[in-house]
Amino acid sequence: MPLIRCSEINNGTKNMRRKTVGLLKSFLLGCMLCMMVFVPGCGGGSTATYHIRQDVDFGFIKRIAVLPMDNLTGDRYAGDVVRQVVISELLASGLADVVVPGEVVAALDKMGPKSISALTTEQLKALGNTLKVQAFVLGSVEKFGEVRVGNVSAPEISITLMLADAGSGSIIWSATRTTGGAGFMARHFGARTDTLSESVLKIVRATLQTLTKY
């Protein structure tokens, strides 16, 4: 029976250690890459699209009216909540003065449109003259509430906002953003998810940033 030298045993042990360390490094690197790809934050993913008229100088806008939002969700207050946050964020941005919501409602009641989405170009022009504004913010709320993934609940929100020129009635900016659901960290490690209020603020702020940067 051939003898096994101690040096051969030591070399075999060293090689095994090197392989083990190499595997651990590869595993840790893979984990880090997964975290970078799937965990931009504790929330879920988000998608966004927007369009802005490049031939418009938005400096002409000094006063804005935020119209009631079309509510396409099962939450009866979703449109009101998003509208109030839009008003607050517009004021905070310093883009323009914002008409008091009650004045907007009173003017719409006198005009009597079937719905905000049914407003015609001529009606928008007339409303602009009444409220003395250069533009309107209008839009809709498509998703608003909590969704459950396994044992984790997280907000899911989808909104569309548009800016209409009161002088022409044409849309000069529009943006749609969807966000929510439990992210990687929340699903697998129990990390905290945003509240519904925090999610509304974040999605409105991110959506308006595509407008206020111009």
Image: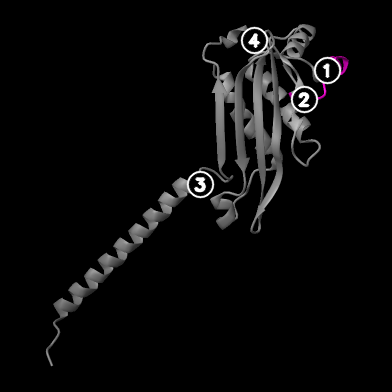
Q: Between 192 and 89, which is closer to the camera in this rendering? A: 89
Q: Quadrant of the C terminus?
A: top right
Contact between marks 1 and 2 (CB within 8 A): the answer is yes
Q: Amino acid at mark 3?
A: Val
User: Where's residue 66, x and y in %?
Assistant: 73, 20
Q: How is the image coloured?
A: one colour
Q: Between 54 and 195, which is closer to the camera in this rendering? A: 54
Contact between marks 2 and 4 (CB within 8 A): the answer is no
Name which of mark 1 and mark 4 comes first in the sequence.
Answer: 4
Q: Mark on residue 39?
A: 3
At 76% from the left edge and 6% from the top edge, which residue is drawn?
129
Q: Nearer the viewer, mark 4 or mark 3?
A: 4
At 19% from the left edge and 78% from the top edge, which residue is drawn?
9
User: Where's residue 149, x and y in %?
Assistant: 63, 55
Task: Inspect the magenta stretch and tell me whether residue 158 lies in it.
Answer: no
Q: Mark on residue 68?
A: 2
Q: Residues within 10 Å of mark 2 (few under 14, many from 20)?
A: many
Name which of mark 1 and mark 2 comes first in the sequence.
Answer: 2
Name which of mark 2 and mark 4 comes first in the sequence.
Answer: 4
Check disc 2 and report its element: helix, strand or loop.
Answer: loop
Name which of mark 3 and mark 2 comes first in the sequence.
Answer: 3
The rendered magenta stretch, by its main secondary structure, is classed as: helix
Q: Amino acid at mark 4?
A: Ile
Q: Considering only vertical position in the picture, is 18 above or below 37?
A: below
Q: Residues within 10 Å of mark 3 (few under 14, many from 20)?
A: some
Q: Between 49 and 200, which is closer to the camera in this rendering? A: 49
The residue labelled by disc 1 is 108
The residue labelled by disc 4 is 61
Q: Quadrant of the N terminus?
A: bottom left
Q: Amino acid at mark 2?
A: Pro
At 66% from the left edge and 39% from the top edge, which residue is drawn?
157
